[in-house]
Image (cartoon, rainbow, N blue to C red):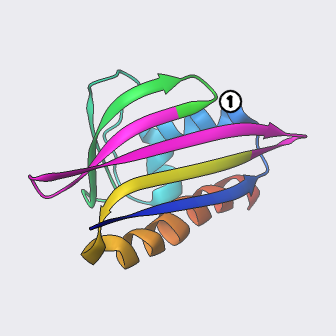
Amino acid sequence: MSKSIVLRRRIKASPEEVYRALINPFTIELWTGDPAVMSDEPGSMFTMLDGNIVGENVSFEPNKAIRQKWFFGEDHASDVLIELFPDKSNTLIRVEHTGIPEEAYDNMLEGWNESYLDSLKDFFEK
């Protein structure tokens, strides 16, 4: 049985700034503290957080949405949708991650909250 996560954060930056921070490997390294491999080409592979996140970029809607597949080992892929919505001078970021193996759920929830969304928010707001 697989599980899902849906999270939201308000970030003090424009959707364009947040989008760039999510697709530029140098900027990803700044807000995560770890080297990243990232491209905005559909079908390209990526790694983040020192290889703890490995996946494939599925599609991009500049400044609005990113679809990815995140891999759990060699035999299980999950789906990630990151959406960006303008909110006055901020961005509301919505993350939907489906198909998470039950045994990985707690780690994924903590990772999304602390290593991903909180780190991204801190990057723009500190």
> Image quadrant for the C terminus?
bottom right
In the figure, residue 7 lies in which quadrant?
Answer: bottom right
Q: In this image, 62 relative to 46: left or right?
A: right
- Pinpoint residue 93: horizontal percent, then vertical percent: 66, 48
Q: Residue furthest right?
A: 88
Q: Is residue 8 left or right of residue 117?
A: right
* Residue 48 visible in image: yes
Q: Is residue 39 visible?
A: no
User: Which element carries disc 1, helix, strand or loop?
Assistant: helix
Magenta stretch: dominant SS? strand
Q: Position of residue 50 (x, y in %)?
A: 28, 59
User: Quick one: quadrant of the N terminus?
Assistant: bottom left
Residue furthest out toward the left: 74
Q: Magenta stretch containing residue 13, yes or no?
A: no
The span shown in magenta is 66-91
Residue drawn at (42%, 46%), measured in percent from left and top? 80
Residue 91 placement (x, y as % from top left): 75, 44
Q: Is residue 92 above or below residue 67?
A: below
Residue corresponding to mark 1:
16
Badge 1, how many Cα within 10 Å: few under 14, some, many 20+? some
* 24 relative to 8, above or below: above
- In this rendered view, identify the residue nearer to me: 87 or 29: 87
Instruction: Say what amino acid the circle numbered 1 marks.
Output: Glu
Q: Is residue 86 magenta?
A: yes
- Look at the picture and state if 88 lies above or below 95: above
Front-lying residue, 5 or 17:
5
